[in-house]
Image (cartoon, coloured by chain):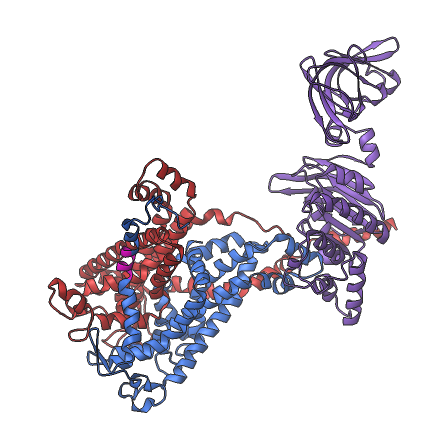
Amino acid sequence: MRVRLEKLTKRFGTVSAVEALDLEIASGEFVALLGPSGCGKTTTLLMVAGIYRPTEGAILFDDRRVDQLMPKDRGIGMVFQSYALYPHMTVAENIGFPLSIQRGMGKEEVTRRVREAAALVRVDQLLERRPGQLSGGQQQRVALARALVKRPDILLLDEPLSNLDARLRHEMRGEIKRLQKEVGITAIFVTHDQLEALTMADRVALMQDAKLQAYATPAELYARPANRFVAEFIGSPPMNFLDANLGARNGSVVASSEGIEIEIAAARLPRGDGTRKATLGIRPEHFEIVAAGQGHATGEVYVVEPMGREQMVDVKVGERLLRAIAAPGFPATVGQAVGLRVASERVHLFDATSGVRLA
Amino acid sequence: MAAIARPLPRSGGVSWTSAIPYAVLLLFTLPILILYGWLIYGSFFPSMQGLRPVGGFTLENWRFLWAPETVEALRFKPPIIPLTINTFIFALSTALVVLLISSMAGYALSRIRFPGRRTFLGGVLLLHSFPSVTLLIATFIILRQLRLYDQLVGVILVKTAFELPFGVWIMKGFFDNVSWDLEMAALVDGASRLRTWWQVVMPLVKPGLLALGLLAFVSGWNEFLLPFVFMPSGTQQTLSVVLRAILNEGRFVDYGLLTAVGLYYVAPILLVFFFAQDRLMKVYAGGVKG
Amino acid sequence: MARTGTLQLEREEQAPSWWRTNATAMLFMGPAAILVIVFFFVPVLLTLGMSFTDIATATGLSGWQWIGTANYEQIFRGSFTGLIVRNTVIYVLLVLTFNVLVGLGVALLTVHVRDQVGGFFRAVWLLPRISPSVVYALMWTWAAAPPPFGIINEFVAPFGVAPRFWMNTDPWMFILFLNGFVGASLGMLIFTSAIESIPEDLFRAARVDGANAWQIVRRITVPLIRWPILFVLVYQSMSLLASYEYILLTTNGGPGLYITEVWSLWAFHTALQSYAGNLEIGLGAAMAAILVLVGVAVSAFLLRAFRFNDLVSEPRVEIT
């Protein structure tokens, strides 16, 4: 089922939680609503669920307008951050609860569907337990089964992994993704964790301060962030930003900042943007550490943080710290003079004031 | 918390000063302990002169249970067993109605948006501290108008109403503590608010229901003023009113009988209190404070 | 396809009616609202209204007339009014002082001693409150009975006090203890939980600074629970002003004419338990009306001062 949000707005009193959000989710697509806390992502999800009524705008499932409908009439299933399993019911009763409400479903049919849903998420051995006797991961699976048992058109997930420990989180990330594709259901999930969003979702809607900042595939978000906020939020460790002046030289543009000069192909910039102030963005993983005097900048090693698979190296260039990633064996010692090199096509340029992407 | 203001332990064992608070506490509490101890003790002797029983141990005072016709003071009073049943019915009905109405209103005030919610919340809180006993005169007129005067139903209604501000406030507090996620989950799963309340939220506030139910039952069981004023003619009388009538008969009453009936009347309360005091005390403290 | 879409848009755009939207809330609130209206709201208005009438059982409750402020004038000119006001002030002040001081004392002592012991004593102090008022009054009546029955005489004899019938000879002292031991538990419970919510570190710090137990109580504990103390003071003085059940069950205003009659009991006697046979409901209502107004005013004050913040949070679900 296709989901369309049109100018969706939610205000609590004078505070705007979601402002004129336009979003279209294709049938069978898995979309992440990503953003820092308080950005409006959960409010958006609760409006789609029918828990909140929009102040303005519309929600459409295919071509049916649903924003005045009760949650039960929307054909949705939802998994909550706390799983929200009913503590006084067994696993089987929990999964069967949505079916028990629907009229006209026989007892045997309910039992069959409960078993089917439980098998789908592999909790069919736990049907007689109570939620209190389950591990976090098992509770999560039961919550998924309960959300899917009535075969909804849309699956909503609110921070589904945030209560799990790191190892389980990794496991459930794959599990939810597998399930979503297997069932072929349209799914929206809310998260504040960019890694979850990038690894699980087909497309990511990045929100900040009640507004949509970007809506694109994970690869696109990473490779061509639409503005400075997106660039900063996506990627870990975060991108380095430098204030720079742009100037024309020899048919190309040179971005110069304190101690750094990088040539950028003029063709990448829109016409007329040849000379002005801009913000340079360079991801740490795109810096290459070279011998002092080589590359685009020279500085001295400030901090080295070995992380196992790689090392994070902070290099002091002038008064600024630039973060770079080096291979684990790289011999970096604090105080050592090094050079930094970056491929010019890896450099992002943003407008200095509006933050909008230039190139 | 026990460590509050307790002197730091010193080397050389327990100092005699640490016994002072125990002694002071015991001294202050002694009157209550004596009163209750004496009630129990005195009910098993023909009569007491001060602390000294007159005569030997006897169950004579308790014969109102098996031979009420031989008890002089009860000759023109309703028999005890039906009185007990009346009192039980009164207390139980009050408790059940208070539970039902309080948990409905408490749920709405905690969980549902509706116009006038703030006003009603303020009203409940205001009534919570309002001395309802000042309204007895007007209530008398209202019961007469509703033709509920001198009937158990009328007294139950008044008692329920007077317990309601407390009950609604307590239940609202319990509902406030139920996770919103559970409520949202039930709604998304397709339940109506009514079903969500009954099937999902109510089972989760069972401790609160139990505590409020016990409290309302105890309060109903103990009630004297309302049946005394609103049910004077006697067919549906309760223990308190009859016990008061015996007590009021003058200076030459049979104290042996009175203590036995008194103990018989208070015993269920003491039992409830013995088994559920922690719970009751929490609700008392929380309820009065808000 | 697009066309049906727009049609549906228009149909479902209509917000549900007010009744539909609030039906659930009305269902849930209905029973409570009816009881509150019938047994609180109407009685308050009725009390005020009747206080301007001569309604009485002598006229059969139906043949009443508006008589303006005659009831109030009668109260203010009444020859016993001065005595009853004096009684009421004595009663409220004496019992309030006892309640708050003893409640505070027991709270402080019970948090001071071992947990189980403290819990036991708090439970004992709660006993009078959860016992039937008739049984509690019976115990005190018997304890204060004339010689050779009463036990109070036995306890005071070693101090050279002559045995007597306390309820008759010292009715105010009797009423003070009777009400005091019931009422102290309210303060005790509230103060106990207030003291227990004070961070332990404050006491530790004070002890490290060299304060002794008394200094800690006076300089730290009491100042930190001043709001609960104020609440108990205000709340309990109002409930005492309105309460008369224990007096009714024991001295019933006596011995003798109006010796221990307090205002609320006076209203009760006038309107509902008159020995003269005629229940002067209008006059009693005027007496009660004054208490009702005090009750409303004090409750409103308590609401403003202590609880209003609790009202702020809004439900997080916008469906009914």
Residue B177 position within the rendered picture, expressed as x and y whole percent measured from the top left: 55, 54
Q: Determine if residue A256 is in view.
A: no
Specify whether B101 is left or right of B75.
right
**In the image, what residue occupies the spot 66% across and 61% down?**
A130
Q: Determine if residue B155 is in view.
A: yes
**In the image, what residue occupies the spot 19% across and 75% down?**
C149
| Shade representing chain C | red
Foreground residue, A171 or B203?
A171
The chain that appears blue in the image is B
Quadrant of the snapshot with the C terminus of chain C: bottom right
Foreground residue, B49 or B251?
B49
Q: Which residues are magenta?
A: B23-29
Residue B231 position within the rendered picture, expressed as x and y whole percent measured from the top left: 37, 78
**In the image, what residue occupies the spot 35% across and 47% down?**
B6
Q: Is A201 colored magenta in this rendering? A: no
**In the image, what residue occupies the spot 42% across and 80% down?**
B86
Specify whether C121 is left or right of B51.
right
| Shade representing chain A | purple
Image height check: is A166 above or below B52? above
Q: Quadrant of residue B35?
A: bottom left
Foreground residue, C101 or A38?
C101
Predominant secondary structure, magenta span: helix
Q: Is B24 colored magenta in this rendering? A: yes
Image height check: is C16 above or below B229? above
Residue B39 position within the rendered picture, expressed as x and y whole percent measured from the top left: 29, 74
